[in-house]
Structures are given as C-alpha cells and as structure tokens.
Amino acid sequence: MEKFFNCSGACIPEDHYMVDIRYQFEQLQPLVDEKRYFIMHAPRQTGKTTIINQYVEHLNQQEAYIALYTNFEGGQALRNQVERVNNLVISTIELAAQVDLPEEYHPSEACFDIRSMEQGLLTFLTKWCLELPKPLVLFIDEIDALIGDSLISVLRQLRHGYNKRPKSFPHALCLIGLRDIRDYRIYSDETKRYVIGGSAFNIKEKSVRIPDFTLDQVRHLYQQHTEATGQPFAPNAVLHVFEQTNGQPWLVNALGRELCFEAKAVPREQTVSKAHVDAAIERLILRRDVHLDQLADKLTEPRVARIIEGILIGTETGEESQTAGEDKQYLMDLGLLRKGKHGDEIANPIYQEIIPRELTAVRQDRLGQDPAWYILETGKLDIRKVIDRYIEFYKEHSELITTRKTYTEAAHHLLLMSWLQRITNGGGTIRREYAAGLGRLDLCIEFAGERFAFELKLNSRRVLEEGRQQLADYLHRLSLPSGWLIVFSRGDVKDWDLVGRREHVVEAGKKIEVIWL
C-alpha cells in the first residue's frame, strides 16, 4: 500500500507521510531523565498524539524505563462523578498496559484492592509502581476532557503521589491537552468556587508547546510524495500552502490529500501548481471536513464570539471584560487566534476565510438572489448593480440587522458579506483582510479577471478622514485606481432618505466612493 497524507488520528510511519519529529525527543528526554512532571499542549490535530506515541516507543526501546500512553477522554461524559471517573481512568490505564506492555509489566490483582475509590488513582499507581522492575513514565492524553471535581480529584492525586516517585509513583509524567494547565479555571461543585489548574497541580515544572510546521517541514512532507510517486510540486505551490495554512498540520495534510489523492486530485503526470492549491483550498472550505466543522461550531460560544466579533470590525471588543485575557488565551489554545502585526488576528488565511463564510452561510441562503442577475453579457460582474441593489435590499430588510442575536456589533459587516458572497459564488472569490487593531475590514472581489476593493467601517467622529487614507493605502497595495468606502451607522436610522447617500472623493490619487448605510 502506498503512503498518503493523514488527516485523522495519529500518524503511523509505515502508512503516512510524516515530518521528522525526532527533534521533539530532544526536549522531552531531559524532562524524563530529571523525573519531571510536565505539560504538553497544542490545538487539536497538530500532532500531539503522534509525537507521544513515537516517543513512548523510543523510550521503551531504550529499556531504562517502562513508558505508557493512555487517554482519559472517556471520563468527559461522567462529569463530576469523582468515584466513577477514578474507576474509569484506572481501567483505562490497565487496558493500555495490557495492549502495549509485556505481560510481566501488567498490574497484578493486588493493585485493584482499593478501599476508597475517591483516592483510587493514587492507590492504583502506588501499588503498580512498587511492583514494576523499572521506573514508570506515564503520558496522559486528553486530560482536559475531565471537568470540575473529577479533574481536580485526578490532578490532586497525582500531586499527592509526586513526592514518592520513582519508587512508588511514576518516575516522570506528562499531561497532554489543548491548554497549559495554568490556564484552567475549574469549577468545583463541592466548594462552589473556581480552582485554578496551576494550584491543583503545582508540581508542574515545564510546559511544552507543539509548534506548527515550518516551511522546510512542509517542503519535506510534500517531497516524500514526490519521491514516492514522481509527482512534483512547483516551489511557489508549496510556499503558497505554507502561507495559507501558517503550517497548521491538519490543513497542510488535508491540502496534500486534496491535491494528490481525492476525486479532483491533480493527475500524477502533472506538476502541482499554485492555482491547484487555490482550487483545493476552496474545495476544503466548501466541503467543511470534520476539523473545519468543529472550528465553525466554536464560533457560537459567547467567549469566542466576543473576540472574533472585535476582530471582524477591527476593534478590541471585549477588552473591558475581566476575562478578556482568558478568552484570548482560550482562542489561542484552540488554534483560532494569533498575535499579528496590527493586533490579534485569525490564526491563518484559511481560517480567516472560513469564519466570515460560516457566520454568513445561513443568511446567504435566505437572500433570494440569483448570481446570474448581476453578470453582464460579457461574463463580467456588474458591480454597480450589485451595490445599487444592496442599498435597496438593506432599506427593505433592515430588520436583518436589528434582530440578529449574536455578533450584533458586526451585523452590518456580516449582512453585506452575505450579499457579496452569495453573488460571487457564481464565479468569483472574495479576499478579506481584518485584525483587531486595523479599525476596518477590507474586501477585494475577484471576478472574471477584474478586482473591486471595499473598505467597511463603523461610523465614528474621524471615520471619513481615517477611511479615505486606509482605503487609499489598500488600493495602492492592490494597484487599483478606485474603490468603495462603506460606512455603517451604529444606531437606529432616523432619516431613511440619508441611507445610501454617496460622496465622491480623491485621496492620494485614488478615486473613492463613500456610501453611508
């Protein structure tokens, strides 16, 4: 069987193209040798499980330790049932040992002689480590699947046994999850208060963050396909994959699979080009694979919505909140957010495209617009008709702004984007630029070889002065002679005759049409 790009579950060297992860072992080995209890965290589908599985195999080949990987995800459904969670995690460790370790290392029946299951994990690990002929190194994945009192119980039992290592407790231990444990705010039903993860597990000595792929790693990954099949990638195609994904491992592999193995894959006798990459990105977005679907689902969470909305409209929405820093860290841990040149921004260009599309998808389907109405006989887009008809539509359906339940500050932006996306789906694309510090959202429609630039801003005291300068800069970067500045009202409309009024100005040699909505 030929190898392929893996997009689900841990990678297997015999089956999948893989980047070289041995360099990760170099930062893990000293932690194990020094008997550390540490954290490994990264967003979902970035390779945590793959790295740990390979490292466990590496440790067991060294024969200095007994290394075991286990996963506590099953405890999530049990929520705050402390005794049942203890029983489940013990059973999970037992099963992992039976599957992955020689029989002589399996826990004996005596290890399960536990008086109180509230301290079941502590008792089990103590008795098992006393039986083992070599120090135990334990890797616990999906630790953050546990919640509330159950998570507190597990963390505190591990902390309790820490001083007895390595004779009667694991020599070294790694907790694996989405976030650093210091960022956990765990609500205890028993004490009716929040407990900070760091206080429940204050023996942690280090946190290891799994980075995204570098450009060289993306090249190496795709080169494996070339060596196996003879199909080359154009250098600018690989660079484009990296720029559009920022090295996010799932996206890199998903694009590799889409380009080389799916129904619309590039024929093996052809070189994969930058244009092929763009087409594959569009198919991924439209198909909404599981990873992207999970990403979209997060947008409904209030803490996520507060931050994303601010980024969409170019402000620091939510900064006044006491939990704003925690919310941002949560989005960074999810892999949704990063620090950019102008402030917080969506983690990579593909996510930047998915998010507004997802937030406008339902609205697009309800607009009742046929893209063909706006296409000229030449096949070009009638941009004037698009804008004129939108102003009419907005006046007739302003309730679509006022009745929105979520993303209310960005309601104007999202309705216009719904309109434009619906029409450009007939044969064009929209490129977006936005970040929390920009104070605007820039759009560029590409249709039938033509480009049209828009800047969207909320009304403010200096909106015209700032907007003209910002749009002129955007037009210079796009090498376009003209564009549209759309200014949205923040309050209720007092005079509908003024809605849709236009001004024509020139800024830095660029023609700008200002439209007030």
Image (spheres, helix red, strand yellow):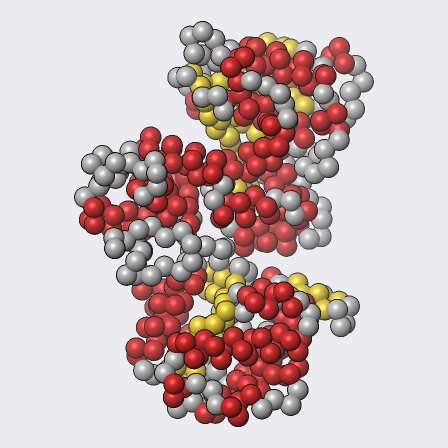
The residue drawn where x is 30% and y is 42% is 260
The front one of 287 and 380 is 287
Which image quadrant for residue 103?
bottom left
Image quarter in which the C terminus is found: top right
Vertical relation: 267 (above or below) 295: above
> Is residue 190 at all visible to an observer of this figure?
yes
Across and down, in percent, residue 366 comes to: 64, 26
The residue drawn where x is 44% and y is 72% is 69
The residue drawn where x is 58% and y is 53% is 329
Vertical relation: 278 (above or below) 49: above
The residue drawn where x is 46% and y is 60% is 209
Residue ranking furthest to the top: 377
The front one of 97 and 119 is 97
For residue 216, side relative to residue 439 (left or right): left
Which image quadrant for residue 491?
top right
Image quarter in which the N terminus is found: bottom left
